[in-house]
Amino acid sequence: MDLLDLPYNPMPAGGRVIALQAEDGVRLRAAFWPATVPEPRGTIAIFEGRAEQIEKYYETVGDLRARGFAVAALDWRGQGGSDRLLSAPRRGHIGRFADFQKDIRVFRDEVVLRHGPGPVYVLAHSMGGNVILTHAASGEAGWIERMVLTAPFLDFGRIPMSRGMVTWLAATLVGLGCGRSPIPPVGRGIAVVKTFDDNPLTHDPMRFSRSAQLLADHPHLAIDAPTVGWIHAAVRSMRLFADPRLPERLRTPMLMIGSGADRVVSTAAIEAMAARLKTAGYVHVPAPATRS
């Protein structure tokens, strides 16, 4: 569960790995970097997206520490340096998104609140935004001062079939015992990115190349396309976001950021959610005219 320190992706100085064990026995990799100033502004807890790993956030960790914050980061179960949930370790699997709440709780108690100075802020990306919003809606977010959610995964982006068809197909395949199988090939193009050209994740060739090199050199940190069970769990997690009572349950101040070029998650769903919530602001990042 070490953190990689690579010439093309150097680990910020002063950090350390913290090995965790969730309440159900799943081992998790977390990391903590103390602030570099005598009087820290607080701690920022990073919640990554699907298929990401702590190493991908080194640049962000450095930026946040330069602004006076301590930083804590976590690899979700099933990805990065945390325990994989299947004997086929490259499959991105989860049985239910509710299991991620166990990861948040042990990370909160054993890393963020134990080692980090307050107040605590959250920076969550994509799937991490889905999971932390669910956490906040459950009434457990009293430890969080504010949240920033970049491209939170509230609904699918551009997919080759309707949301209703995805829901039906995933439920049917799980019912047939195929929950641990990879998604059908028709859905893998946006989930498994091989080249920079037309990739759905970034317009920045330098950062794309750095992440691709990291996973090529250290494939144990990578996962491939999600399983059918992951898709089924994701669909079920979205039910909360359609609940008309949700605005009354989400009291934590937050900023949501959506991208005009996003094909992975639905920017329209992010805009609609921000408009519903009394405590949310929204920033739209327009699509660039060309790739860098």
Image (tube, rainbow, N blue to C red):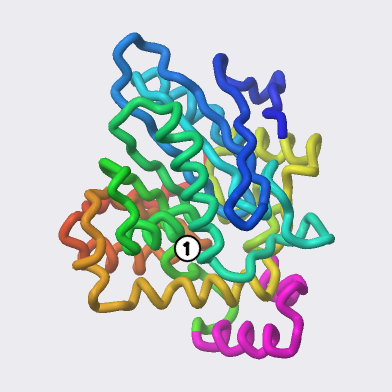
Residue 247 in the image: state x and y as whole percent: 22, 67
Q: Is residue 167 magenta?
A: yes
Residue 209 or 97: which is nearer the viewer?
97
Q: In this rendering, would 278 be left or right of 2?
A: left
The stretch drawn in magenta includes residue 249? no
151 over 234 or under it: above or below: above
Left or right of 285 on screen, residue 15: right
Give the residue drawn at x 34%, y 63%: 138
Q: Main secondary structure of the magenta part?
A: helix
- Secondary structure type for disc 1: loop
Residue at 54% in and 34% down: 57
23 up-or-down from 47: above or below: below
The single residue placed furthest to the right in the displayed view is 87
- Counting from the top left corner in percent of width and height, residue 4 is at 70, 27
User: Is 172 above or below relative to 272?
Assistant: below
Q: Taking 90 as reference, is 170 left or right?
A: left
Instruction: Say which residue label 1 marks.
Output: 265
Number of other residues with Cα within 10 Å of mark 1, as a class: few under 14, some 14 to 19, many 20 or more = many
Q: Is residue 233 left or right of residue 212?
A: left
- In the rendering, at what x and y percent does residue 291 appear? 52, 44
Residue that appears at 61% across and 22% down = 11
Magenta stretch: give its range.
164-188
8 above or below 47? Answer: above
Q: Residue at x 44, y 60 (%)?
A: 130
**Quadrant position of the N terminus in the picture:** top right
Q: Position of residue 63 (x, y in %)?
A: 43, 24
